[in-house]
Image (cartoon, rainbow, N blue to C red):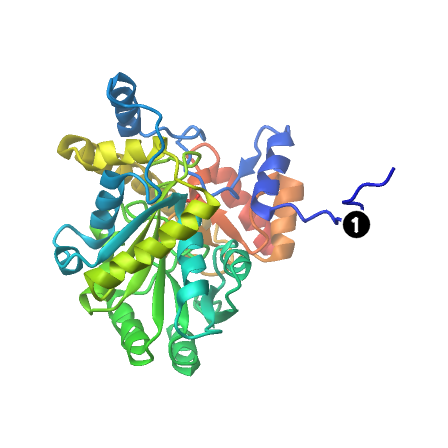
Amino acid sequence: TTSVFEDVKAAPADVIFALTTICDADTFDKKINLGVGAYRTEEGKPYVLPVVKKADHILVDDKNLDHEYLPILGQKAFRKESAKLILGASSKALAEDRVGAIQCISGTGALYAGAHFLSKHYPIKGAACYISTPTYANHRPLLEGVGLPVLEYPYWNPATKGLDLEGMLNAMQSAANGSIFLLHACAHNPTGVDPTPDQWRQIADVMEAKSHFTFFDCAYQGFASGNLDKDAYAVRYFVERGLELFVAQSYSKNFGLYSERAGNLTVVAKTPEIKDRIESQIAKAQRAVISNPPAYGSRIVSTVLTDKKLYSEWEQNLSTMANRIIHMRKVLFDELTRLETPGKWSHIVDQIGMFSFTGLTTPQVKVLKEKYHIYLLDNGRISVAGLNSKNVMYFAQAVDDVVRNH
Ligand code: PLP
């Protein structure tokens, strides 16, 4: 008997998840997983935020909670607090009631909801969505999946191991008026390089002059610098300038809620009426795809965001994570300096957020994997969170070897 699916070809495995599978199966005692973008403690273990544990207990004891459907747009307090978190409590756009919020399946779902809406309702037919080179591996397939044409803008300058501002601005200038630009709000993935406030001003100038539409991806608020306001700078600045925009927010990293899929799409429109219409269209689309979002993660988040004491505990948990990563960057940098590893390594401490774009080449990465059992992306990206005081010296020595000899 033949199957109706006889001709279906196998799809390639996801590179990052595949790396974890290989690392998990590796029995070498000094192996290191620097691939997965998830926070690890000093013991190399996943971290349940203490404030999340507290919120958990509150929810378990809450006799009023049930398992009814959430509304299609999600939980009200969660949506409201999410918009406030990214825009700031004193945001003019919030006061003017022109901010919409849609609870989504984490950051990916928020990107999807925004991109899907743009594919249906963006006024310029065939407008391209520009993504940075390089960018988060899921951006292109997600955007192409909803039928948006995808083009790229330069971002990383390999010579300086920093931002290619000129290339980025030139691409924005030469893009057709009214193009869509997907920008990383903070802690750019994979490079760890963000524009400075002055560079954001220059970017906003061109975005405004060219009537481009801004879609921010914000997966690391508070996780990058340890400060929620600082990490929201770019979004708030664009809103202050009166620009309409979308922000896809994820609570995976900053709450450690990777598997709960808590996220939000914040929509800043010109008027309350337009905001309402956009929300209604996204609600209609959301109904057909997920019907309504999951409750648990959003309850944890809103429990923390609506309680002053829990909120400040969350801020402490955030700085614990951010500071450990910042410290690991410094230890790695110091060790490479001590070993006199050829090359300049200051980008390790200059880059922010979870990742470092090390500049290691694909052949060097191959040796790290095969000889040292150290797993990282072929483009040289490491998750700094995978380093701790017990394995960082082993990593530095391995890097020193591959840089000198491969
Ligand atoms: N956007 C960026 C830049 C990311 O790095 C990630 C996760 O790694 C996401 C979005 C999606 O995150 P989530 O797990 O919340 O869907």
Q: Residue at x 43, y 28 (%)?
A: 43
* Placement of the N terminus among the 4 image quadrants: top right
* Residue type (three-letter) at the residue carrying disc 1: Asp
- Residue 299 position, x and y percent, is 29, 32
Is 119 situated left or right of 58 in this image? right
Residue position for label 1: 7
37, above or below 181, in the image: above
Most foreground residue, 118 or 372 = 118
Question: Is 375 displayed left or right of 242 in the figure?
Answer: right
Some atom of ligand 1 lies within 8 Å of the CB belonging to the residue at label 1: no
Image quadrant in which you'd find residue 132 = bottom left
Q: Residue at x 25, y 40 (%)?
A: 76
In the picture, which quadrant includes the C terminus?
A: bottom right
Q: Position of residue 288 (x, y in %)?
A: 46, 47
Q: Using the image as rendered, state which of residue 278 and residue 182 is in the foreground.
A: 278
- The residue depicted at 24 percent of the width and 20 percent of the height is 62
Residue 364 is situated, as x and y percent measured from the top left of the image, at 62, 53
Task: Give the class, few, some or many, for how many residues have Cα within 10 Å of label 1's Cα (few <14, many ≥20).
Answer: few
Give the SS element for disc 1.
Answer: loop
Q: Residue furthest bottom?
A: 174
Residue 282 visible in this rendered orientation of the protein: yes
Give x and y (percent) for residue 7: 79, 50
Residue 405: in sight, yes or no?
no
Taking 221 as reference, is 21 above or below it?
Answer: above
